[in-house]
């Protein structure tokens, strides 16, 4: 796909419009047919619409020709978006609607009176420039809202080439900013990225065979072939790199536009005023630049000092300043000199100001001199769909989250460096925690940490998934659970650092990764492990104790269901006399009500079975849930039959026995695509074998469910090796019978 092909499509469409204008008998004066939007810019993709406006001088009356014009265009096979407006009506619409104003900035003459088209273009531009200082705030909010709605093109798993932040719509907005004369944008870079993204969109249209801007995963191989790239990974990296660059240009342009709008006398030109803020560093027009006479070639800390000042002040780090430091600056020696590590930590702990500065360092090539290992994760997509960002951006977001937690730890410098490096092993053949540890140790040593601190950074990277995985998949009452943590964590200081890193990592991943439920489980595990490390008595965990309803105390066969509304859904509690199959019945109740389970825990308390379910839905009816559960328990509803419908998944489930996870029970771990009735299927299979579920720990992250069941014989005690294998086989067989290849059917909502 090339500019030449787009130009050929545009010429063909132009000829069609001109012929239709003439065939309709439209007047040659006082009337003009114009192209707007993408057609006005000559950027027609294979399946683009033709956006055209029939413009009339204010004193021209509409004739039958205004309707006759459209018939040959409709018959041509093009999709036509058309309107008939007077010049005054166009200007009024542009004044009322920013989207109209932006589209009319690209007016291009097609047929009729060229003088009228010129008049319209001049009037639209004049109005836009006159009102820009009062309208840019509204335009900025539209851009931000679109980004919140469509995500970032550089990071979204299914990006939208037009609407996502860093996409074609942002490129058009940047051109509108330039047209306002409020701010300038590097024209060459903008056009290079915009034209290259147009090539990607053309390829997507060809692959999809229709007009679409969304790139679903299965399109990437064919898109790569159309673009002449070696494979889907290269096509993704190419597209995300263009989007990253456009996002960077957009952030810079808007920061500079906002700074310009704050100028009290914008029409007065004044010489740059430098305000020195640190050795070699100054402020100019709300940007961090080099001070006059800065020792660029002699001071290896100058780049980090500029970056730290800009991030802490949440100001723009001027790209020309960074580019000069990359070309002429003194390199950082190995190991780093005194003060360099502190500047890096200041930069990482700056909070919201870090992202823009880090992007500038990345886009100018400065990161190669500071952290050459960054190239390992640059633009690398996460394997898990739950992640909002690519790996490199996730690391920066983790630093931003960790910056808010530094008051909770004794070594904030270690926390910030570990936050930056915790996923540095992604993209390697081995598991990323294992692969990342030696890389992180080398970096920590290079930046000036001593041997003990290097060990601490390495341990944090190696075990940064220890707390969330253990807390959500292991029984906190089992001594082996706490022992699993204390065997890997040296002391309470390291545990506190690991807890802070866990929270920062999860918050930077997505909202689903750090719910109140997950946070409470991690906090409980940290309290217990901290007590063991300090040789203190284990604290009583209030999460594991509930008030047993009187109805259940009087009759263990009774069931009690309560619902508590929480910020992100509801918490459903089920209590009844402990028996084999109770958990399966509770899961069936929720699945039959099409309730979506995010997480769950189940345990036995004084002969009573308790399960607590963290669910997405709110406003659940306690009475209806209890009645549904009673119907399942009494056999009036055949839950298994109703939930037996095959569910399409891409990967078959796995079932494993974790022999080292407990000394008092057998631990069965199930990993599967999240789907309706999953927990019920597992628990029913175990109940049919007369295996009792002592406790359960259910966790859902994106499309993946990780469910762990502590099981015992009905007479208590762990299962024998043969019985454990049989139980795992039975669970897998039960899951496979409700499995269908992807595309074989549709799954309904809910999980239970």
Image (cartoon, rainbow, N blue to C red):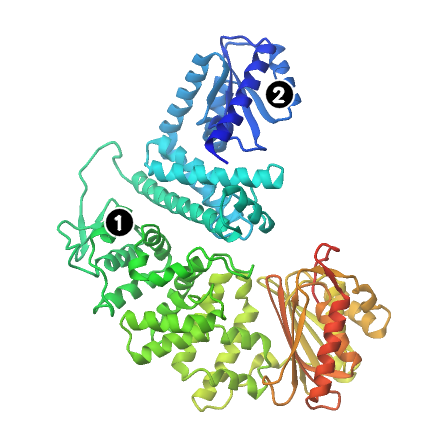
Q: Position of residue 602 (x, y in %)?
A: 66, 77
Q: Is residue 175 above or below residue 545?
A: above
- The residue identified by callout 1 is 323
Q: Does residue 576 appear in the picture of this structure?
A: yes
Residue at point 44%, 35% (across, down): 172
Question: Left of 505 or right of it: where is 291?
Answer: left
Frontmost residue, 522 versus 480: 480
- The residue identified by callout 2 is 73
Whether label 1 touches label 2, CB < 8 Å: no
Q: Does residue 139 appear in the picture of this structure?
A: no
Frontmost residue, 544 versus 68: 68
Q: Is residue 704 above or below residue 581?
A: above
Residue at point 33%, 76% (across, down): 454
- Mark 1–mark 2 Cα distance, whole angstroms, equals 51 Å
Near mark 1 (Cα within 10 A), the count class, few <14, some 14-19 or many ≥20, is some
Q: Position of residue 191 (x, y in %)?
A: 39, 36
Residue at point 44%, 37% (across, down): 195
Q: Position of residue 702 (x, y in %)?
A: 59, 61
Q: Is residue 358 above or below residue 584?
A: above
Residue 188 lies in quadrant: top left
Residue at point 12%, 51% (across, down): 293
* Location of the C terminus (image quadrant): bottom right
Frontmost residue, 211 versus 282: 211
Near mark 2 (Cα within 10 A), the count class, few <14, some 14-19 or many ≥20, is some
Question: Left of 200 or right of it: where is 256?
Answer: left
Question: Left of 263 or right of it: where is 115?
Answer: right
Q: Secondary structure at mark 1?
A: helix
Q: Position of residue 393 (x, y in %)?
A: 43, 57
Q: Work out whether mark 1 precedes mark 2 in sequence or the reverse, and give the earlier one.
A: 2
């Amino acid at each position: 796909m090339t500019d030449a092909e787009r130009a050929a499509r545009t010429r063909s469409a132009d000829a069609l419009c001109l012929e239709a204008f003439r065939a309709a008998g439209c007047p040659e004066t006082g009337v003009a047919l114009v192209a707007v939007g993408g057609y006005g810019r000559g950027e027609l993709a294979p399946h683009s619409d033709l956006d055209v406006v029939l413009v009339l001088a204010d004193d021209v009356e509409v004739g039958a020709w205004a309707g006759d014009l459209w018939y040959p265009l409709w018959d041509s096979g093009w999709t036509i978006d058309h309107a008939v407006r007077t010049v005054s009506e166009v200007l009024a619409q542009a004044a009322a609607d920013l989207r109209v104003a932006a589209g009319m900035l690209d007016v291009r003459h097609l047929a009729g009176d060229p003088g009228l088209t010129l008049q319209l273009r001049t009037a639209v531009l004049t109005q836009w420039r006159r009102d820009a200082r009062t309208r840019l705030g509204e335009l900025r909010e539209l851009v931000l809202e679109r980004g919140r709605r469509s995500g970032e093109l550089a990071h979204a798993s299914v990006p939208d080439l037009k609407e996502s932040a860093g996409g074609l719509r942002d490129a058009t907005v940047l051109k509108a900013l330039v047209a306002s004369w409020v701010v300038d944008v590097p024209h060459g870079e903008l056009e290079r990225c915009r034209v290259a993204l147009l090539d990607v969109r053309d390829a997507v249209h060809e692959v999809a065979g229709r007009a679409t801007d969304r790139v679903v995963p299965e399109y990437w191989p064919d898109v790569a072939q159309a673009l002449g790239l070696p494979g889907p990974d290269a096509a993704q990296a190419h597209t995300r790199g263009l989007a990253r660059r456009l996002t960077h240009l957009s952030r810079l342009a808007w920061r500079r536009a906002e700074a310009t709008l704050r100028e009290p006398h914008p029409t007065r030109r004044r010489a740059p005023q430098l305000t020195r803020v640190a050795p070699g560093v100054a402020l100019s027009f709300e940007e961090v630049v080099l001070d006059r006479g800065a020792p660029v070639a002699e001071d290896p800390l100058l780049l980090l000092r500029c970056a730290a000042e800009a991030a802490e002040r949440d100001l723009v780090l001027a790209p020309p300043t960074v580019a000069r430091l990359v070309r002429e600056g003194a390199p950082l020696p190995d190991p780093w000199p005194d003060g360099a590590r502190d500047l890096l930590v200041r930069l990482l702990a700056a909070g919201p100001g870090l992202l823009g500065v880090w992007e500038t360092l990345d886009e100018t090539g400065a990161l190669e001199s500071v952290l050459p290992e960054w190239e390992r994760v640059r633009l690398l997509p996460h394997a898990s769909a739950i992640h909002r960002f690519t790996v490199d951006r996730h690391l920066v977001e983790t630093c931003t989250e960790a910056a808010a937690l530094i008051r909770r730890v004794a070594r904030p410098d270690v926390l910030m460096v570990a936050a930056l490096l915790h996923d540095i092993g992604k993209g390697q053949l081995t598991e990323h925690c294992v692969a990342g540890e030696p890389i992180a140790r080398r970096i920590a040593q290079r930046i000036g940490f001593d041997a003990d601190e290097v060990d601490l950074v390495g341990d944090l990277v190696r075990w940064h998934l220890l707390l969330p995985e253990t807390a959500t998949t292991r029984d906190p009452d089992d001594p082996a659970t706490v022992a699993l943590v204390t065997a890997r964590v040296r002391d309470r200081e390291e545990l506190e650092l690991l807890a802070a890193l866990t929270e920062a990592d999860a918050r930077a991943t997505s909202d689903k990764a750090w719910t109140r439920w997950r946070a409470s489980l991690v906090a409980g595990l940290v309290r217990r492990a901290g007590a063991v490390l300090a040789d203190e008595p284990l604290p009583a965990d209030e999460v594991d104790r509930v008030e047993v309803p009187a109805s259940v105390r009087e009759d263990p066969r009774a069931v009690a269901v309560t619902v508590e509304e929480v910020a992100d859904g509801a918490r459903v509690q089920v209590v009844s006399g402990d028996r084999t199959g109770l958990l399966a019945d509770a899961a069936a109740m929720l699945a039959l009500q099409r309730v979506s389970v995010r997480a769950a825990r189940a345990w036995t308390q004084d002969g009573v079975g308790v399960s607590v379910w963290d669910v997405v839905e709110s406003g659940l009816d306690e009475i209806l849930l209890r009645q549904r559960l009673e119907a399942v328990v009494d056999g009036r509803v055949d839950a298994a039959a109703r939930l037996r419908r095959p569910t399409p998944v891409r990967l078959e489930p796995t079932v494993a026995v974790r022999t080292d996870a407990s000394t008092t029970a057998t631990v069965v771990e199930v990993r599967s695509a999240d789907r309706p009735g999953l927990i019920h299927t597992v628990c029913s299979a175990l109940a049919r074998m007369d295996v009792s579920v002592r406790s359960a720990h259910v966790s859902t992250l994106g499309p993946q469910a990780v469910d762990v069941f502590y099981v015992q014989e009905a007479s208590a005690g762990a299962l024998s090796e043969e019985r454990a294998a049989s139980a795992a086989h039975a669970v897998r067989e039960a899951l496979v019978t409700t499995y269908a290849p992807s595309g074989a059917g549709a799954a309904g909502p809910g999980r239970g």
